[in-house]
Amino acid sequence: METVAILELNGEKIEINTNTVFPVILADVMYEGDLDLMMADLKSKNKLMSEAKKIKFISENIPGISSNFVTKPFIFSEFLSYLNEFNLTPGDFNHATLNELYDIILDYADHHNFDELKKIVKFMIDIDPNYTPAYEILGSVLIEEGNLEEGKKYLELAVKQDPWNVAALSELGETYFNLGEYEKAAEIWMKEVELMPENSVTYFMIADAYRQCKNFKKAARILEKFLNKYPKSILAKYELIEIYRKLSRNIEADELKEEISKSQPEYVSDVEIWAKIMFQNKKYENVEKFISKFLYKNKEYEHFKILLTIPFLKSGKKEEAKLIIREIKEKFPWYYYGMKNILDEMLDENEKSILMD
């Protein structure tokens, strides 16, 4: 500890040393800037109180002082050094909050500063072993690093402590899925949809997990449940058709396919599947009319224009089709290659050759 300056204020001399800033840092990081709360919580720490009283006196006599100039940026190694200097351990923080540290580790996660993040998380867990967000983010980081088994353990801890943590449930389900534990993935995602039934994507993830483990009855059941909530979902009907075929429920599959062919998409996610079904039923004019109208109203989905190439070629509009393909290849190459399988399936060799010219 070194003396930096002697401050004269209202007739008093206050020694400012290299440790005087720490109460400001500590209050900001652990007590949401509440110096009084920090002093009450750590009142038995005489060395810390000596410096904290200086800060309190200064702040009372010089209004408008901001803590940012001493607390930003946060360097955890320096923070630990100060803790050692003042003989503070995680067990001393009875009324501290971990919100600021959580914000810090979120920033570290965004910048992939994983090593430093892990050190802070360990410190947070030492302070509060029941702080669920710490386990959740550590599990997520370990998974991102490729350590799925270790990451899974921390996500399981997060879910055990907080069964209502939807984010942890979602990621744990994905981890189980990636590890090939499909029944567990479906079980976890079922808990997620119970908490957040409006998370429509999760229903499809559950169905996929059941398909992977050949449990087609349960896969059908979850999509049937979804269709009870969203009866106009073409994507759900399309996936259910495939599952019904696996279960030899061909009459129901045919009925769903007929339903799709007589409908129009209500959701953007249904447009491609609907178009594919319509192409299979040779209803090219229906697709052309719908897509043209849809694009007129929704300019941001310009890439759907590629769906017009099939009806254009079928009706002899070769040049229009070629222009669209050139445009999509230039503007949305990712979408062109994603849709190429549909083009190959729906066009004959002569039509494909026209697009290659």
Image (cartoon, helix red, strand yellow):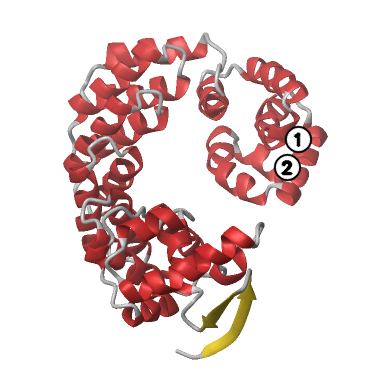
Total residue callouts: 2
| Discs 1, 2 touching: Cβ within 8 Å | yes
Residue lying at 59% horizontally and 49% vertically, measured from the top left: 337
Identify the secondary structure beneath mark 1. Answer: helix
Residue 300, how many percent across, how many down? 72, 33
Residue 225 percent coordinates (x, y): 29, 17
Residue placed furthest toward the bottom: 2
Give the residue at x 31% y 45%. Answer: 168
Q: Which mark, residue 325?
A: 2
- Closer to us: 234 or 16: 16
**Residue 289 at x, y = what percent?**
71, 16
Q: Is residue 112 visible?
A: no
Q: Nearer the viewer, residue 175 or 305?
A: 175
Work out whether 126 lies above or below 162. below
Of the residues shown, which amino acid type is indicated by label 1?
Answer: Ala
The residue at the point 53 percent across, 82 percent down is 15
Question: In the rendered view, would you say 10 is above or below 132?
Answer: below
Q: Look at label 2 and name its amino acid.
A: Ile
* Left or right: 246 as drawn, with respect to 238: left
| Spatial separation of the CA atoms under disc 1 and disc 2 | 6 Å
Residue at screen point 47% across, 14% down: 260
Where the N terminus falls, by quadrant? Answer: bottom left
Query: Picture quarter containing residue 98?
Result: bottom left
Residue 170 percent across, percent down from the top left: 33, 42
Between residue 145 and residue 47, name the one nearer to us: 47
Q: Residues within 10 Å of mark 2 (few under 14, many from 20)?
A: many
**Residue at numbered disc 1:** 321
